[in-house]
Image: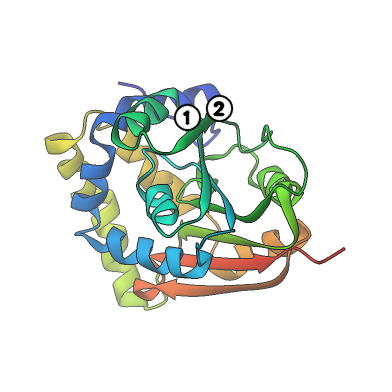
Amino acid sequence: MERATLEKNPVDVAKMFDGVSGKYDLMNEILTFGLVKVWRAATREAIAPRPGVKVLDIAAGTGTSAASYAACGAEVIASDFSRGMITKGRELHPELEFVQADAMDLPFADESFDVTTISYGLRNVQEPDRALQEMFRVTKPGGRLVIAEFSRPKNSFFRAAYHTYLKGFMPLVAKLFSSNAPAYSYLFESIEAWPAQEDFARHVQNAGWRDVEFRNLTDGIVALHRATKPSA
């Protein structure tokens, strides 16, 4: 089975997600005990999709979140690096426009989108800072960035329990239900290596975004970062 390493070679990452695409949504539900729905709702609220708003959803996977934005009337493009994810997404959501795209080299014109968003995908990109700059480029002046990403629980006891879950329990569940269990060992490693909320906020700021803020979800298992591109 395919899995990536923390070097995050783009070819390896794409193959890994190709391998989990068949049961991706099911595993998200199982491994988060359904909390993924709560996190998606918070992300959708931050995006505020509505008619007249053009949204780019990067690392959109099978399009579950992108479809909910489109259902609110927004014009949505769902992009992902994995051909397998896009194939599955087109099966599930034929109403959506899917584009295979590398977050570090987006195939979109400057200042194309009102909101650019990525959920649980940025830590899989080889050069996250470069991706943040690309998101900045394709967002309109005054437009917004919304990033949902796994982060660091704030309570020390909860953080220790979460670490135990990621390292011990999650791989066992992945062996039972996933189509590519080794990929979930990478998931643990990539979460552990990702910067804490405050540190990541500085990366967003350094990419040119302003009004950078974050909100902890479920004590910081997920951090919801928001920022604005300065007006011209």
- Looking at the image, which residue sits at the far left? 176
How is the rendered protein coloured?
rainbow
Discs 2, 1 touching: Cβ within 8 Å = yes
Q: Which residue is mark 1?
A: 13
Of helix, strand and loop, which one carries label 2? helix
Residue at image point 48% right, 59% down: 148
Q: Position of residue 219 (x, y in %)?
A: 37, 75
Tell me which corner region of the image, top left, top right, bottom left or bottom right, holds residue 53.
bottom right
- Disc 1: CA contacts within 10 A as few (<14), some (14-19) or many (>=20): many
Q: Which residue is mark 2?
A: 10
Give the CA distance from mark 2 to mark 1. Answer: 5 Å
Q: Position of residue 93 (x, y in %)?
A: 34, 37
Residue at image point 39% right, 42% down: 63
Residue at image point 18% right, 51% down: 30
- Disc 2: CA contacts within 10 A as few (<14), some (14-19) or many (>=20): some
The residue type indicated by label 2 comes to Pro
Residue at image point 60% right, 37% down: 126
| 47, 211: nearer the viewer | 47
Q: In the image, is 93 to the left or to the right of 60?
A: left
* Residue 63 numbered mark, or none: none
- Looking at the image, which residue sits at the far right? 232
Tell me which corner region of the image, top left, top right, bottom left or bottom right, holds residue 61.
top left
Q: Position of residue 180 (x, y in %)?
A: 26, 29
In which quadrant is the N terminus drawn? Answer: top left
Image height of 200 relative to 167, above or below: below
Of helix, strand and loop, which one carries label 1? helix
In which quadrant is the C terminus drawn? Answer: bottom right
Q: How many marks?
A: 2
- Looking at the image, which residue sits at the far bottom? 155
Q: Position of residue 210 (x, y in %)?
A: 74, 69
| 37, 120: nearer the viewer | 37
The residue type indicated by label 1 comes to Val
